[in-house]
Structure formats: structure tokens, C-alpha cells
Image (spheres, helix red, strand yellow):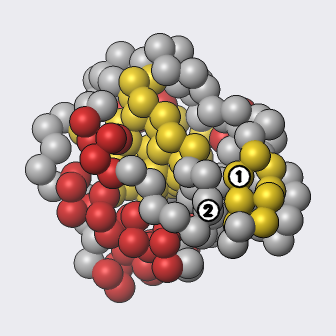
Amino acid sequence: MASITLGGNPVHTSGELPTVGSQLADFKLVQNDLSIASLSNFAGKKLVLNIFPSVDTGTCATSVRKFNESASNLENTTVLCISRDLPFAQKRFCGAEGLENVVNLSDFQAGAFGKANGLEIVDGPLTGLHSRAIIVVDENGKITHTEQVAEIANEPNYEAALAAL
């Protein structure tokens, strides 16, 4: 269980992020067209998993915008923006913002991705949502970088995530 804060108040996650050097576990997440995506959909690509509570908050929206901007210059890399938002909300946000370089994936059905990766917030006002975290994966599915953002309202360290590619 990781201890993080929301507005300076302690909250906890369901576990710890996967360790650097381990393989990213397979997942089943919902795409904007309601089809299911799994790790195999991105085989052979480097991945930046930008994980956050909701695209409808300022910091989460900023992280999607910043990674969208960076993604246009990344070779053989896909940025996955993962939250428990409904796919419709994710699609609406990216459409309104003109964001086309990231892939939105939703864990709304059962939160299995968040639970499997120690991301589910288990207490406080955001209970059930994902904490803000980054997981970077190489083209073989090996985790090369993780960051559990200590204060949910803070942005992740974009430079460290991109340097791990």
C-alpha cells in the first residue's frame, strides 16, 4: 500500500507499483469505440502509461495534453492515458482539445487494471479511482520506469518518464 496525499491529506492505494525490471502484466481496458485493448495490441512498441484519476480535473487534463505533445516526436512509442473515466468522456475531451497522439483507455468496468497494479485509491474522497502514476515499458514489455506521484494534484515528472524510453 502506497501512502500519497490529496490536498496534503493522506490517502492510500491498494498496493505498490510494479517494479522496474519486471514484465507489465497483460490488461484488458476499454477503448473509445468500446472494444477491448490488451497489451498485445501494442506489441513491439514502447509504452508510456499516463495513469490518473479523471480527465475532468485540471492536472489530469494537463498531463494528457503534455504527453500528446511529446508523443508526436517519439519513435516507436505509444502513450496510453488510463483512467476510470467512461470512454465517452475520454473521447469528448480529446476531441474538444484536438489531441490525436495519445490512446485513451478506460478501466471503468471493474477497475481490474488499477487493482492489479496497486493504483486503486482505497480511502478518501477519490476512493475507487486510480492514483496519478507513470509506468514506462520497453518494446518487450519490460518496465523501465515508474513514478507514483506523491501528491495527486501534482503533475508527474515528464522528463524522467521520457528519458526512460
Q: Position of residue 28 (x, y in %)?
A: 61, 39
Q: Position of residue 116 (x, y in %)?
A: 71, 33
Looking at the picture, which amino acid does disc 1 mark? Ile
Answer with mark 2 or mark 1, whichever residue precedes in sequence.
Answer: 1
Residue 152: numbered disc: 2
Q: How far is disc 2 from disc 1 in space, using C-alphas?
A: 7 Å
Q: Is residue 44 left or right of residue 109?
A: left
Q: Position of residue 138 (x, y in %)?
A: 33, 24
> Residue at image x 57%, y 21%?
19
**Residue at which label 1 appears:** 4
Residue 25: numbered disc: none
Q: Is residue 90 left or right of residue 100?
A: right
Q: Between residue 115 and residue 19, name the one nearer to us.
A: 19
Looking at the picture, which amino acid does disc 2 mark? Ile
Question: Vertical placement of 131 versus 142: above or below?
Answer: below
Q: Position of residue 90 (x, y in %)?
A: 49, 70
Q: Split into 4 quadrants, where in the image is the C terminus?
A: top left
> Residue at image x 39%, y 24%?
144
Q: Secondary structure at mark 1?
A: strand
> Residue at image x 49%, y 34%?
146
